[in-house]
Amino acid sequence: MNRSDSTDGSNAPVGAAIALKQLSPADWARFGTGEIAYLRPVMVNGVRAVAIHGADGQPIGAAPNAELAVAAILQHEMAPVLLH
């Protein structure tokens, strides 16, 4: 059995990989929008903070620390992901 085959013999993982490779840059920019929020450490006026960005890169908020940023993201039913 090929590593990319699932246990039921379907080629679903292979088909998904092919579909992802065919996404345009615009499609990738929208991928996860409304579902994923990225955290990025930043400095604001010399003070450490955490910027919150949507999956498309759009800034959507900030917090004084990662814990509060994650709480805000989860409150909006999104999945937090750390960028570094």
Image (cartoon, rainbow, N blue to C red):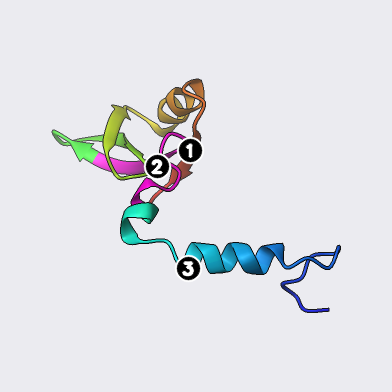
Q: Nearer the viewer, mark 3 or mark 2?
A: 3
Q: SS of the residue at dot 1?
A: strand
- Please tell me the numbered disc located at residue 38: 2
Q: SS of the residue at dot 2?
A: strand
Which residue is pictured at 83% across the width and 68% down the height? 9
The residues tagged by marks 2 and 1 sit, at their Cα atoms, a distance apart of 6 Å
Marks 2 & 1, CB-CB < 8 Å contact: yes
Please say if 83 is above or below 12.
above
Residue that mark 1 sits on? 80
Q: Which stretch appears magenta?
A: 29-42
Amino acid at the residue labelled 1: Pro
Which residue is pictured at 67% across the width and 64% down the height? 13
Q: Does the magenta portion include 34?
A: yes
Q: What is the x, y in percent for residue 5? A: 76, 70
Q: Please name whichever residue, 3 or 47, is drawn nearer the observer in this view of the structure.
A: 3
Q: Quadrant of residue 62?
A: top left
Amino acid at the residue labelled 3: Lys
Which residue is pictured at 38% across the width and 55% down the height? 28
Q: SS of the residue at dot 3?
A: helix
Tell me, yes or no, if residue 13 can be seen here: yes
Residue that mark 3 sits on? 21
Please say if 11 is above or below 83.
below
Amino acid at the residue labelled 2: Tyr
